[in-house]
Amino acid sequence: MTQTQAVPGEEALRTRSRTFEWADPAGNAALIGQRSGLDLLRAMIAGELPVPPVMQLIGASRLEAEEGRVSVEMTAQEFHYNPLGSVHGGVLSTLLDTAAGCAVHSTLPAGVGYTTLDLSVKFLRPVTTDSGLLRCEGTVLSRGRRTALAEARLTDGRGRLAAHATSSCLIFEVP
């Protein structure tokens, strides 16, 4: 008679799946020449324009925007995890880059775009599914004609700072 033993952690090896949808980002990109950054962000918030695909990819939600400040929220999910059982730093960096970059975008007039030049991130505590609702707020610290400096602060559901980033952005005219 053969005896089968359960493998430790076998239950954790069950496959999970996730699907999501997104809108063609070319439509929003075409509007950069016609609307200010703040107008575009507010149209996304109002549901008049779709959010960028990366927001759907990471499960970010609840975008808020005013000139020079943007916040976005995300609940940490298992699909964000690294092999150590916490949210991957790249996911948190994406959230920080989104908040900082969109804060810069909120200050730009129609016909002007931006791109991130650098992002410096400091992780202060692990983030897991137990961290609650994550809130990331980006703020413009300085903006000139060609570059802008912004920061983003990521807090967990208990209001504790989990990560911080500074970002330099290149500002350019959209052809």
Image (tube, helix red, strand yellow):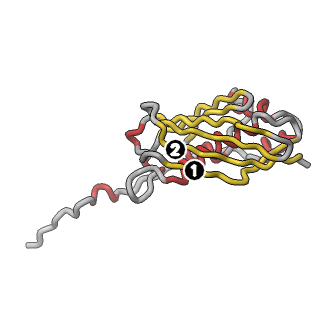
- Residue matched to label 1: 121
The percent position of residue 145, horizontal first and vertical second, equals 86, 42
Q: Earlier in the sequence, mark 2 or mark 1?
A: 1
Q: Kindly indicate the quadrant of the structure image that contains residue 59.
A: top right
Using the image, determine if residue 93 lies above or below residue 134: below
Per the rendering, the mark at residue 174 is: none
The percent position of residue 111, horizontal first and vertical second, equals 89, 40
- In the picture as drawn, the residue positioned furthest to the bottom comes out as 1
- Residue matched to label 2: 163
User: How many neighbours does mark 1 have within 10 angstroms: few (below 14), some (14-19), or many (20 or more)?
Assistant: some
Question: What residue is drawn where x is 64% and y is 29%?
Answer: 64
User: How many neighbours does mark 2 have within 10 angstroms: few (below 14), some (14-19), or many (20 or more)?
Assistant: many
Question: What residue is drawn where x is 82% and y is 44%?
Answer: 113
The percent position of residue 74, horizontal first and vertical second, equals 53, 38
The amino acid type found where label 2 is placed reads: Ala
The amino acid type found where label 1 is placed reads: Val
The percent position of residue 63, horizontal first and vertical second, equals 63, 32
Compare residues 27 and 42 and report the one nearer the observer. 42
Task: Quote the CA–CA distance across marks 2 and 1.
Answer: 7 Å
Q: Secondary structure at mark 2?
A: strand
Compare residues 109 and 42 and report the one nearer the observer. 109
Label 2 with label 1: CB-CB less than 8 Å: yes
Q: Secondary structure at mark 1?
A: strand
